[in-house]
Amino acid sequence: MKSARRVWLTPAYLLHQYAYRDTSRIAEVFTREHGRLSLFARGARAPKSAFRAGLRPFQRLLISWVGKSEAGQLTAAEIEGDFTQLPAPRLMSGFYLNELLLKLTERFDPHPQLFELYSRTISAMTAGHPEEAQLRRFEKRLLEELGYGVDFSRTDAGERVVPGGFYRVRPQRVVMRCEAEAPEAVPGRSLIELSDESFENVDTLRDAKRILRASIEACLDGRTLGSRVVMKSLHRREQA
C-alpha cells in the first residue's frame, strides 16, 4: 500500500481558493520545491479555523501537507516573514500574476526561480515600485522559464537588432527585420530595451506589453484570463 507523502513547512503562496462542502476549502498553492498544488483545507471556513489567518493571497507562507494522491490535505499554513498587504489599486495586477501561474504551470512541476521571481514582484508592487515595469518583467521571465522566451537582441538571421531598425516579432519564436510601414512593426530601440528589461520609456512599455501578451495568448491556446477581462472592464468604466 502506498504510504502518504508528508511535507513540512515548505515556502508557498496561495494563488486561489474556493469553497468545498460545508466548512472546507480547496487551496491552489504555488510552492518553491514542489510547484503548483491543489490541497484540501479541512474546516478552513469554520469561525475558529487555524487556517483563517494564514490562507490569504500575496502573503509568503510556510505550509505543511500530507497526501497519497495528486490532491493532498493541508495540515498547517503560517506566515513567513513580514505581513504583506498589496495596495488596493494593485490587487487586480496581483490576481493577474496568480492566474498566469494557475494556467501556465503544471501541477508538481517545480520552478524555484519562478517562485522567487513571483515573490520579488509581489514585494516590489507592495513597496510601490512602478507597476507596469514589474508586470512586463514578470511576463518576460515567466515565458523564458517555461521555454517560450525570445532573444529580442538578434533577428532570425543572426543580426543584432539596432535602435533605428524596425522589426516584427513572431510570438514564442523569433525577431524578423521589416519595413517601418509593415503591420505591427516595432522600433529596434523598444526591443533592445525589452531585452535589457529597461522599462523606463513609455513607448517601450507599450510595445513590450503588446509583444509579451501575444506570446502569453499563444501559450493559453484559446483560454481567457478572467483578471484581464475585469481590468479591461474597469479601464473602460474609468474612461467613461
Image: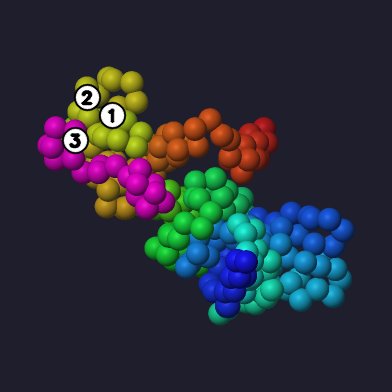
Give the mark nearest the N terminus, 3 or 1. 3
Per the image, the residue denoted by label 1 is 168
Q: Is residue 184 shown to the viewer in this render?
A: yes
Q: Rounded to the nearest whole Å, what is the CA distance between mark 2 and mark 3?
A: 10 Å
Q: Quadrant of the N terminus?
A: bottom right
Q: Which residues are magenta?
A: 142-162
Residues at discs 3 and 1 in contact (Cβ within 8 Å): no
**56 part of magenta stretch:** no
**Location of residue 202 by image quarter:** top left
- Secondary structure state at the residue bearing disc 3: loop
Amino acid bearing label 1: Arg
Give the mark nearest the N terminus, 2 or 3. 3
Residue located at (19% from left, 33% from top): 156
Question: Where does the image place residue 5, in percent across and percent down from the top left?
Answer: 59, 70
Per the image, the residue denoted by label 3 is 155
Left-right relation of 24 to 30: right
Q: In the image, is residue 188 above or below residue 48?
A: above
Residue located at (84% from left, 56% from top): 21
- In this view, the residue in front, 41 or 16, is 41
Q: Residues within 10 Å of mark 2 (few under 14, many from 20)?
A: some
Left-right relation of 232 to 197: right
Q: Rounded to the nearest whole Å, what is the CA distance between mark 3 and mark 1?
A: 9 Å
Per the image, the residue denoted by label 2 is 178
